[in-house]
Amino acid sequence: MTARLHCFGESGNAYKAALTMSLAGYAWEPIYVDFFHGATRSPEFLALNEMGEAPVFEEGDLRLTQSGVIQLHVAQKTGRLLGAPDEREEVLRWLFWDNHKMSAQAGTLRFLMNFLPEEKRPMEVIAWLSGRLTVALKTLERHLEGRDWIVGNGPTLADTACCGYLFYPEPFTFERKALPNIDRWLDRIAALPGWKHPYDMMPGSPADRA
């Protein structure tokens, strides 16, 4: 059975789920969500996910929301990207850290800096979020010193979570070349079989709306 992922290319959280499925060899297909024209607020979408957020995962009678939950389901079902048995809690630690400390800042900041009309961008909020994201990126940069992967000797959900927003080209206080450990780590992820850029993996990109 092929899973369906309701998603759109600009969503870093959807990308985490899509990338996890692709790297784990999980059969899936994207279902485009027209976020920028209000699709997630429609009655039809709210019937899928009362939180009004993408991604939404569907497989048979199973429906899952929240990227971390989808990632865990895929990893547990395939036995891939979980890490060694004694690494599972550490993988979860970084999964939860990303959701709270990095993606939460990066996603909001990227939206405010690129997808709002310039005259509506709240500069004080942008400055505050930039500081928060900078701290998170420094944490990840330090952790990756001397490491190939966030946890253990191979890619795990920690990697597919923490990289979620870092492959996007739009400016959002992330200068990849200024963070050499992160830069090398992203290159390793991009070299994995099944990797694709988010705009190639899922439908929807700023170019489509230009």
Image (spheres, rainbow, N blue to C red):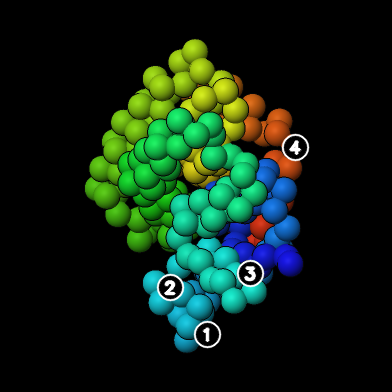
Q: Count residues near mark 3 (Cα–Cα under 10 Å), then give few for <14, some for 14-19, many for 20+.
A: few
- Classify mark 4: helix, strand or loop: loop
- Proximity of marks 3 and 4: CB atoms separated by less than 8 Å: no
Between 55 and 3, the residue placed more toward the observer is 3
Distance from the alpha carbon under mark 2 to that under mark 1: 10 Å
Dot label at residue 44: 1
Q: Nearer the viewer, mark 1 or mark 3?
A: 3
Residue 33 in the image, given as x and y percentages of width and height: 59, 70
- Classify mark 1: helix, strand or loop: helix
Distance from the alpha carbon under mark 3 to that under mark 2: 19 Å
Q: Nearer the viewer, mark 3 or mark 4?
A: 3
Image-based side of 74 in relation to 89, left or right: right
Residue 48 in the image, given as x and y percentages of width and height: 50, 78
Distance from the alpha carbon under mark 2 to that under mark 4: 32 Å
Q: Amino acid at mark 1?
A: Glu
Using the rendered view, name the quadrant where residue 127 is placed. top left
Which residue is tagged 2?
52
Q: Nearer the viewer, mark 4 or mark 1?
A: 4
Between 43 and 129, the residue placed more toward the observer is 43
Dot label at residue 193: 4
Q: Amino acid at mark 4?
A: Pro
Which residue is tagged 3?
59
- Proximity of marks 2 and 4: CB atoms separated by less than 8 Å: no
Seen from this angle, which residue lies furthest bottom? 43
Earlier residue among tags 1 and 3: 1
Residue appearing at x 37%, y 44% in the figure: 96
Seen from this angle, which residue lies furthest top? 146
Q: Amino acid at mark 3?
A: Glu
- Classify mark 2: helix, strand or loop: loop
